[in-house]
């Protein structure tokens, strides 16, 4: 084999390589592919190696004396790529149940030589292939719960249905500037963010990202925080009261100045009339005396 392990995305096509060399005619060539399945796609490689001896293999596909025989459950999904010159097989529409340890056994009587293949410490013309399945994250679902009034508390939830390896959940606030938020992990496929003491600065667009080696999927929540009606009317009443008091004080000041100015003008006018009256009153007597 040219490789000891392969990774494939569920639903894709994968070629399982198995090379051999022979100097004999190929009329009696025999190729057998078997599989020791595993229950979990994330089984450690050290444990998977034990499958070679601890698990029974079932036949996947066989080439014997010019005939190809497929396992009934794999008909239409498995086939040789270049028989008889190559023992490679192709697996279509891969599924999680396809994961496991594959064994390729080649014999071509009467040849008995056992050349080594690749870097595997295996018997000649027998090798194993590990397929590790992976899947990109599914589209996450974003939700929120709580009180978005001033001073309230809000929790943002993000859940992803699947992904192999397990996706990493991340929350960011995107505007007015991008800020990474601390995430509370709730299981492998969900994460939440809690916002306390909600204010106008809490408003904005929030993004949840689910990421693994095969890609990233996002969902979004747009939060708008509103002031409570009581606080708004109280502020408005306070502003109107202050404005009214200012106008009243200004009116009183204008009235005082006007009264003061009017009083001064009246006093000077009275003095002038009195002096003029006295002058007219005493003038005849003075004139009379001057003629005596």
Image (tube, rainbow, N blue to C red):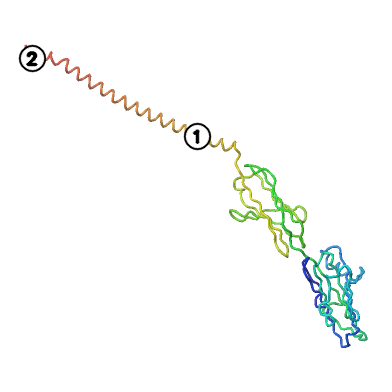
Residue at disc 1, secondary structure: helix
According to the picture, the residue beneath numbered tag 2 turns out to be 290
Q: Nearer the viewer, residue 108 or 48?
A: 108
Residue lying at 68% horizontally and 46% vertically, measured from the top left: 154
CA gap, disc 2 and disc 1: 76 Å
Counting every numbered tag in the picture gives: 2
The residue that disc 1 covers is: 240
- Quarter of the figure with residue 48: bottom right
Location of residue 189 in the rendering, given as x and y in whole percent from the top left corner: 76, 56
Q: Relative to residue 208, is residue 109 drawn left or right?
A: right
Instruction: Please name whichever residue, 156 or 285, is drawn nearer the observer in this view of the structure.
Output: 156
Specify the quadrant that holds the N terminus. Answer: bottom right
Q: Is residue 87 visible?
A: yes
**Quarter residue 53 falls in:** bottom right
Q: Position of residue 139 (x, y in %)?
A: 72, 57
Of labels 2 and 1, the one closer to you: 1
Q: Taking 28 as reference, is 237 above or below it?
A: above
Left or right: residue 59 versus residue 155 is right
Residue reaching furthest to the left: 292
What is the x, y in percent for residue 126?
A: 88, 78
In the image: residue 166, left or right of residue 284: right
């Amino acid at each position: 084999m040219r490789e000891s392990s392969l990774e494939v995305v569920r639903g894709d096509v994968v070629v399982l390589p198995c090379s051999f060399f022979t100097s004999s005619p190929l009329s009696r060539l025999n190729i057998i592919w078997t599989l020791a399945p595993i229950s979990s796609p994330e089984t450690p490689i050290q444990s998977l190696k034990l499958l070679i001896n601890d698990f029974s293999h079932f036949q996947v596909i066989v080439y014997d004396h010019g005939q190809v025989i497929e396992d009934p459950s794999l008909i239409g999904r498995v086939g040789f790529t270049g028989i008889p010159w190559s023992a490679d097989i192709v697996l279509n529409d891969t599924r999680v149940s396809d994961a496991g340890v594959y064994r390729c056994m080649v014999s071509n009587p009467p040849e008995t030589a056992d050349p080594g293949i690749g870097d595997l410490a295996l018997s000649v013309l027998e090798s194993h292939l590990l397929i590790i399945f992976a899947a990109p994250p599914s589209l996450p679902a974003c939700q929120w719960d709580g009180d978005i009034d001033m001073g309230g508390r809000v929790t943002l939830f993000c859940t992803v249905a699947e992904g192999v390896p397990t996706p990493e959940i991340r929350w960011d606030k995107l505007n007015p500037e991008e800020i990474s938020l601390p995430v509370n992990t709730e299981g492998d496929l969900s994460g939440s963010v809690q916002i306390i003491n909600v204010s106008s600065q809490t408003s904005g667009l929030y993004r949840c990202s689910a990421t693994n080696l095969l890609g990233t999927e996002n969902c979004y929540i747009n939060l708008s925080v509103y002031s409570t009606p009581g606080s708004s009317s109280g502020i408005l009443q306070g502003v109107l009261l202050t404005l009214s008091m200012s106008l009243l004080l200004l009116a009183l000041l204008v009235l005082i100045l006007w009264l003061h100015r009017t009083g001064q003008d009246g006093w000077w006018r009275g003095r002038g009339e009195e002096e003029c009256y006295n002058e007219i009153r005493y003038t005849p007597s003075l004139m009379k005396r001057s003629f005596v």
